[in-house]
Amino acid sequence: MSQSLRAPLPLVPGPVGIAWLWPVLLAVLLLLLLLSAASGAVEIPLAELPRVVLGHSTAAEAELWRSIVLEVRLPRLLFAALAGAVLALAGAVMQALFRNPLAEPGLVGISSGASLGAVCAIVLGGGSFALLASSAFVGSLLATAAAYHLGRRHPGMAGLLLAGIAINAVCGSLIGLFTYLADDNQLRSLTFWNMGSLAGASWPRLLVLLPLLLLLSALVLRYWRALNALLLGEREALHLGFPFKSIRRQLILLTALLIGPLVAATGGIGFVGLVVPHVVRMLLGADHRRLLPAAMLGGAIALVLADWLARTVVQPAELPIGIVTSLVGGPFFLWLLLSRRR
């Protein structure tokens, strides 16, 4: 791997000021939420949407529209925003932790380990959400620990990324084995779940995950000073008073806690954790006091937009959201890799 790929991410301000970015991101997210809530197999006039939600609409279809918005679309949209924010936050942490803009939870084994744990729960344990979430967390933690310990045997980031590729391959093979052993009902669930989906979003599931993921995200955000120091190098971080090994373990644990339950609920949604933090870093620089919350807003926007496309492009059918994110993220990843090579 070239020296440019091992170089620390630059701790410099980006070309865009921060003062106007927050209201722009919030406005874009709100606009997308409104448009997505009104769009789908059943179209709702955008001007009528506020009255439908408040129960003041006089349209003949008002009750049907209100049921669709409040019971189906709103929990799904909020879940998409939450999932996108968490995935982007985890990606930003991974990129800083390993000082490489190509790092993300999927590349170092966190997502594949979580997927393997969830698949094991579906095939062997019946697939209750509590079992799915706990199994996904254990799988993500074990896969990440294996990648970390195998990768540290080689200098630089090459060892970690190679270990991540190997663990992804092993997890993919085991997922294939369990898929082969699954019965017809399990197979249908696994096929759609492996491609990523927000169709299982509901108010009870959202109310379970929302406080947990927001609490974990708040804990991660408190590490912005340590992440800034880590960008300068391990030795420099130690000189600045940050225990590098302890912080790395804590952040890996927090990332696994974030990704595990999320993967259990959504399946495999790739590239959000890679693309969004990189774009935000190009705009703002690598100061994590600004980068982490901006990445969360950007991730929420990206996944709400992807979910809107997944529900409307081939309606009344629905594309798995993982296909939409991969169609965008895959070419971006190739461009990023080629541009850094040059």
Image (cartoon, rainbow, N blue to C red):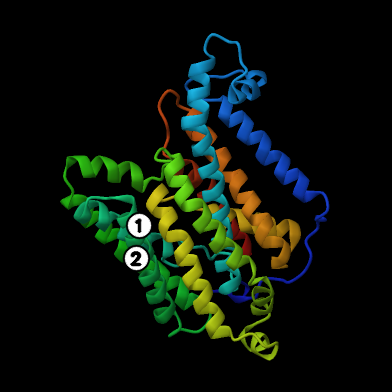
- Three-letter amino acid code at the position of disc 1: Ser
- Quadrant for the C terminus in the image: bottom right
* Picture layout, residue 127 above or below residue 103: above
Q: Give 183 or 108, whichever is nearer the viewer.
A: 183
Q: Give 107 or 243, whichever is nearer the viewer.
A: 243
How many marks are shown on the rendered structure? 2
CA separation, marks 1 and 2? 7 Å
Q: Give 334 or 342, whichever is nearer the viewer.
A: 334
Position of residue 171 in the picture relative to residue 272 (left or right) = left
Position of residue 142 in the picture relative to residue 326 (left or right) = left
* Picture layout, residue 12 above or below residue 331: below
| Residue contact between numbered discs 1 and 2, judged by CB atoms under 8 Å | yes
Residue sitting at 54 percent across and 63 percent down? Answer: 216
Question: Percent from the top left, x then y, of residue 248?
Answer: 53, 78
Residue 231: quadrant of the picture: bottom right
Q: Is mark 2 on a helix, strand or loop?
A: helix
* Disc 2 crowd, CA 10 A, few/some/many (<14, 14-19, 20+): many
Q: Is mark 1 on a helix, strand or loop?
A: helix
| Residue 115 circle label | 1
Residue sitting at 50 percent across and 17 percent down? Answer: 63
Question: Percent from the top left, x then y, of residue 178?
Answer: 21, 55
| Residue 26 circle label | none
* Disc 1 crowd, CA 10 A, few/some/many (<14, 14-19, 20+): many
Question: Percent from the top left, x then y, of residue 306?
Answer: 53, 40
First in sequence, mark 1 or 2: give its number. 1
Residue underneath mark 2: 139
Residue 143: quadrant of the picture: bottom left
Position of residue 216 in the picture relative to residue 287 (left or right) = left
- Three-letter amino acid code at the position of disc 2: Gly
Residue that protrudes farthest toward the top in the picture: 60
Question: Percent from the top left, x then y, of residue 327?
Answer: 49, 43
